[in-house]
Image (cartoon, rainbow, N blue to C red):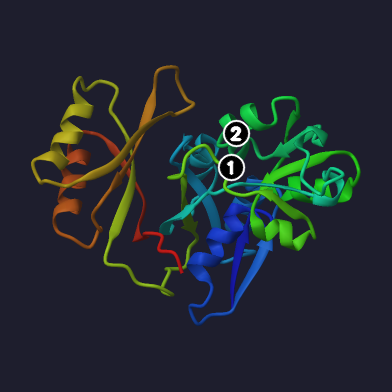
Amino acid sequence: MISVACLPKGSTSDEAARYLLNNQGAEIQYQYHRMIADVFLSTAEGKTSYAIIPIENTIDGSVSLHTDWLVDEVNLPIQAEWVYPSIQHLIGAASELSGADGSLTFDRIVKVMSHPVAMAQCTQYLKSRLPHAELEHVGSTSEAVRIVRDNPGRGWAAIGQISAAADNALDVLETAITDHDNNYTRFLLIGNEPFTLRESAKHKTSILITLPEDYPGALHQVLSAFSWRRINLSRIESRPTKKKLGNYYFLIDIEMSMETVLLPSAIAEIEAIGCQVRVLGSYPSFTYEAR
């Protein structure tokens, strides 16, 4: 049995986890947590085999809090990555919002709640369709749906997933309310056990580089080590080291496996100029395909 820590049942993280793991010939046990810190700690403390971490979104970019946890708080290698569509829906009790003719009356919605990232993905929709409603942030989209379920008759609605609506006996009042059709979230599977349930022709490696303070032009030389070898970088992001103002490390995603000849030699060249390099993981990368 494979145990997996994840954000609450019915969240985008839950659906994304099932996309990657279910129907792969293994028994999966999900342990749901309200806070992302508990997701990380569950695996770091050996209570689960893996943790599911949303790390980047098409609209909002990198999730800095999750990146900092991955780098500073736990030492869990990345075992896989995949993308999953983050499509949000307006959820509530249709019977409470229907007019005399049976049609939905959105004027009766006085509050909309959801996770702040999900709500940000629906900004234009909320402004045009529900400008009068109070907006409230909660810990997850699935938590928002549960709160609406537990407070009938108050004119509350949630932004969340269809599976959460079904689990809580609520209705999908309006589908696909995200502002952009190409809204995807990138997820990481982290843990100490290699991921073997699925194979992919595409592999990536993530590294963390800390530059020497007394080496002008060090970042240029780091990038040159990849450039002349024609190694493609899919992301480079700077984050503060939290040790000194103006001191940053660089998180780099590389479209190449550590099993190749070129990448280890590039890292050796970078280390030779005094950079500290930490490999966060070398792993298969999966692209979403509708089933």
- Circles 1, 2 touching at the beta carbon (< 8 Å): yes
Q: Is residue 76 above or below residue 112?
A: below
Task: Please name the residue shown 23% across and 28% down the image.
Answer: 219
Residue found at x 63% / y 35%:
116
Q: Position of residue 172 (x, y in %)?
A: 70, 53
Q: Residue at x 25, y 20 (%)?
A: 214
Residue 52 image point, x, y percent = 54, 56
Please give the label number shown on residue 125: 2
Q: Residue furthest right?
A: 153
Label 1, residues with CA under 10 Å away: few <14, some 14-19, many ≥20: some
Instruction: Report the residue that reaches farthest toward the front.
Output: 101
Residue at the image point whose x is 57% and y is 47% from the top: 176
Which residue occupies the foreground of this view, 33 or 272?
33
Using the image, tell me which numbered label, if any, was put on residue 177. Answer: 1
Q: Position of residue 210 (x, y in %)?
A: 33, 33
Going by the numbered disc 1, the residue's amino acid type is Ile
Residue 149 lies left or right of residue 4; in this view the side is: right
Residue at the bottom extreme?
25
Question: Sequence-wise, which precedes: disc 1 or disc 2?
Answer: 2
In the image, farthest residue toward the top: 245
Q: Residue 9: in sight, yes or no?
A: no
Q: Quadrant of the N terminus?
A: bottom right
Q: Is residue 227 above or below residue 283?
A: above
Crowding at mark 2 (Cα within 10 Å: few <14, some 14-19, many 20+): some
Hey, what amino acid is under mark 2?
Tyr
Pick whichever, 103 or 41, lies toward us.
103
Asked if residue 59 can be seen in this view, the reply is yes
Mark 1–mark 2 Cα distance, whole angstroms, equals 6 Å
Residue 289 lies, in percent from the top left, at 40, 63
Front position in the image: 34 or 175: 175
